[in-house]
Image: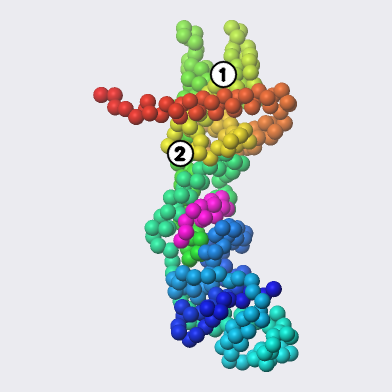
């Protein structure tokens, strides 16, 4: 059944505000332009079901009108007057039609394809003099950036936590903006704003700040966390001891730093519990529940899948920091980067996916313990709000 506007919105010649509400006949290339020209990204712009009422024609938007009603399903015979009025406003009948629109007084033989063409022609005429959509306000722009910067750090719980390619950054930021969009009414009506490279860099800066802060937490605690200092009275130089320990934890026993372990009197490595390293539990509890990034807000009710990525990222960065301690040349000239840690991250993800049922049960208990410890620390946040005068 075709769409028809209610009779009270039929054009009367009284000005722009009297134009009827027409079905959205805009071609795909006329989609909202505030998001840029990425086809895949524009495909994400289908409005939510409860926001579709905010869509309107380009002409109505450009004049800032608030429409009083929506297009509704009606029988075209009930609005014969509307049909004739629209046809007359075209100045000429459609030459491809077998029947004249004005002669179809009873409407019995009126072709639905003709109705479609009438609305298209009326829309073109009604928008010829329309002004282009106005840009969004600076306040709305700042709100988009602010909400996006808060949300983008949630990639910590995804496979994208250590991405570094420009194309990946652009894709992630645009997806984040799509998630933010329903929260901002000014964007729900599709005004003009381009998600250009400057906006992408501004939003992605939050990820850079987070990664830097997280790596700094690990660096500051790595020596104590992995006992990278020689036993008292041993006479072993600290640098030499670092190299020996890192050789054992990284090279001789790959990924053993993720386990709970100790060294026997003869320096033999003893693994007590796999995937239960207290250092990794400490740094993750700190950054997820006790930092200004408020990452715990993005955790699901059952966050095991999300924490798999967080544990893998923390472990990958930890390995790079351990290498800094064990390879003096690396510590002097290197800079830990996502590109450096990504291969280890990928290896750990693959390794965790291949655990036995018994190993997976141990890892699940470790994650449950992490959530419990993090929430307990979060409940004591008021203890940190004091002045030690």
Sequence-wise, the earlier of marks 2 and 1 is 1
Foreground residue, 97 or 254? 97
Residues shaded magenta: 171-186
What residue occupies the far left of the structure in this picture?
A: 389
Q: Quadrant of the N terminus?
A: bottom right
User: Compared with residue 91, is residue 302 higher up or lower down, i.e. above or below?
Assistant: above
Q: Say which residue label 1 marks.
A: 244
The relative height of residue 331 versus residue 17 in the rendered view (above or below) is above
Check disc 2 and report its element: helix, strand or loop: loop
The residue located at (64%, 80%) in the rendering is: 78
> Which residue is label 2 attached to?
293
Which residue is painted at 52% across and 78% down in the image?
Answer: 9
Q: Position of residue 152 (x, y in %)?
A: 51, 46
Quadrant hosting residue 74: bottom right
Q: Answer yes or no: is residue 280 visible.
A: no
Please indicate whether residue 110 sits to the left or right of residue 293 in the image: right
Q: Are marks 2 and 1 in contact (CB under 8 Å)?
A: no
Give the vertical position of 322 relative to 93 (above or below): above
Rendering coords of residue 99 (x, y %) = 71, 90
Taking depth in this image into account, of 14 and 203 the one nearest to the observer is: 14
Residue at image position (54%, 66%) is 55
Position in image of residue 83 (x %, y %) = 62, 84
């Amino acid at each position: 059944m075709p769409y028809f506007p209610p009779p009270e919105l039929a054009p009367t010649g009284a000005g722009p505000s009297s134009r009827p509400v027409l079905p959205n006949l805009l071609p795909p290339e006329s989609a909202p332009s505030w998001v840029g020209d990425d086809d895949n990204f524009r495909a994400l712009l289908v409005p939510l079901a409860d926001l579709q009422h905010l869509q309107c024609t380009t002409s109505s938007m450009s004049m800032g009108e608030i429409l009083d009603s929506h297009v509704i399903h009606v029988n075209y015979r009930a609005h014969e007057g509307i049909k004739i009025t629209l046809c007359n406003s075209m100045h000429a009948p459609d030459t491809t039609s077998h029947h004249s629109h004005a002669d179809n007084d009873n409407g019995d033989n009126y072709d639905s394809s003709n109705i479609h063409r009438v609305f298209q022609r009326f829309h073109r005429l009604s928008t010829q003099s329309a002004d282009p959509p106005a840009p969004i306000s600076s306040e709305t722009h700042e709100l988009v950036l602010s909400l996006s910067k808060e949300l983008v750090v949630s990639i910590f719980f995804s496979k994208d936590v250590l991405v570094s390619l420009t194309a990946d950054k652009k894709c992630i930021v645009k997806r984040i903006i799509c998630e933010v969009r329903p929260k901002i009414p000014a964007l729900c009506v599709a005004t003009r704003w381009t998600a250009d490279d400057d906006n992408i860099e501004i939003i992605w800066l939050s990820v850079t700040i987070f990664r830097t802060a997280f790596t700094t937490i690990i660096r500051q605690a790595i020596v104590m966390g992995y006992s990278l200092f020689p036993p008292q009275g041993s006479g072993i130089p600290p640098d030499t001891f670092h190299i020996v320990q890192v050789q054992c934890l990284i090279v001789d026993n790959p990924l053993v730093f993720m386990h709970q372990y100790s060294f026997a009197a003869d320096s033999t490595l003893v693994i007590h519990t796999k995937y239960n390293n207290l250092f990794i539990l400490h740094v993750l509890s700190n950054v997820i529940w006790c930092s200004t990034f408020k990452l715990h807000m993005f955790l699901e009710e059952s966050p095991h899948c999300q924490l798999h990525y967080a544990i893998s990222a923390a472990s990958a960065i930890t390995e790079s920091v351990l290498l800094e301690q064990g390879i003096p040349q690396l510590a002097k000239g290197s800079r830990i980067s996502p590109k450096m840690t990504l291969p280890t991250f990928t290896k750990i993800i693959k390794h965790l996916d291949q655990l036995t049922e018994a190993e997976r049960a141990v890892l699940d208990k470790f994650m449950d313990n992490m959530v419990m410890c993090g929430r307990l620390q979060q409940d004591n946040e008021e203890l940190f709000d004091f002045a030690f005068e």
